Image (tube, rainbow, N blue to C red):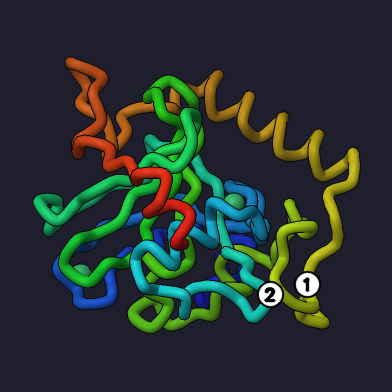
Amino acid sequence: MSALPSSYDAMDLPLRCRCGRMRGVASDVSPSTGFRFVCYCKDCQAFARFLERADVLDPAGGTDIFQMPPGRVRLTAGTDALRCLRLSNKVLRWYTNCCRTPIANTAARPHFPVIGVVHSFMDHEADGRSRDEVLGPPLCRIYESSAVGPLPPNAPGPPSLGVFACRASRMLGWWVRGLGRPTPFFDDRTKAPRAVPGVLTRSERTAL
Ligand SMILES: [Zn+2]
Ligand SMILES: [Zn+2]
């Protein structure tokens, strides 16, 4: 038994929107219990701009995301501030309307056993450890063709077959162990999203 936590111990990570109204906990978080990557896709960038939170993007427009099972994410306060936006048919993008913090991406239906927690919802200050210590470094980058500038020198590489296989086997494990539920973003009984997904008009979308 060691007295000091190492980066390989799965631990709770506090979640908090920028203003502190919405709070939550991600449990059993470690480099091996989730999948961290950086996404440069246009929708992630549009989401940040819609929220007027371009500050959550890296200089090339990347979003740092940690995918983990829904059953390990809990919202503990301020859930009345929960909102979501739908930029494509497959993904719901969740945020708070108190301070417009991007918090997570999920599939549009509750059955898919993955939540992509956006780094801006992680309270590393309260946690006392850096993101790299808690989550390990990002394992890959995706959609780099949509990057808006040169990638940062420390950007992770494109996904290898091994990285894809690793993600697939972790997701399968979560599904097998029933960690796909409960999810804080969908009603357990009706399966409906806990906020009505907002949709942008074509001109609103183009403006982003
Ligand atoms: Zn807030
Ligand atoms: Zn993306």
Three-letter amino acid code at the position of disc 2: Ala
Report the side of 149 relative to 207 (left or right): right
Residue 193: horizontal and vertical position, in percent? 25, 31
Which residue type carries mark 1?
Ala
Q: 14 and 100: which one is in front?
A: 100
Q: Is residue 15 above or below residue 42?
A: below
Within 10 Å of the Cα at label 1, are there few (<14), some (14-19), or many (20+) other Cα atoms? some
**Disc 1 on helix, strand or loop?**
loop
Residue 85, numbered label: none
Q: How far apart are labels 2 and 1 at the CA level? A: 10 Å
- Does any portion of residue 72 appear in the rendered image? no
Q: Is residue 13 above or below residue 20?
A: above
Residue topped by disc 1: 155
Q: Is mark 2 within 8 Å of ligand 2?
A: no
Q: Position of residue 94 (x, y in %)?
A: 34, 49
Residue 12 percent across, percent down from the top left: 39, 59
Tag in front: 2 or 1: 2
Q: Which quadrant does ligand 1 occupy?
A: bottom left
Residue 162 shown left or right of residue 140 in the figure: right
Q: Which residue is painted at 44% across and 61% down in the image?
A: 207
- Picture coordinates of residue 39, whole percent (x, y): 65, 57
Q: Are the residues at dot 2 and dot 1 in contact (C-beta closer than 8 Å)?
A: yes
Residue beneath disc 2: 60
Q: Nearer the viewer, residue 73 or 156?
A: 156
Q: Secondary structure at mark 2?
A: loop
Sequence-first tag of 2 and 1: 2
| Residue at x 14%, y 51% (from the top left corner) | 79
Report the residue that reaches farthest toward the right.
Answer: 161
| Residue in front for this viewpoint, 159 or 128 | 159
Picture quadrant where residue 59 is located: bottom right
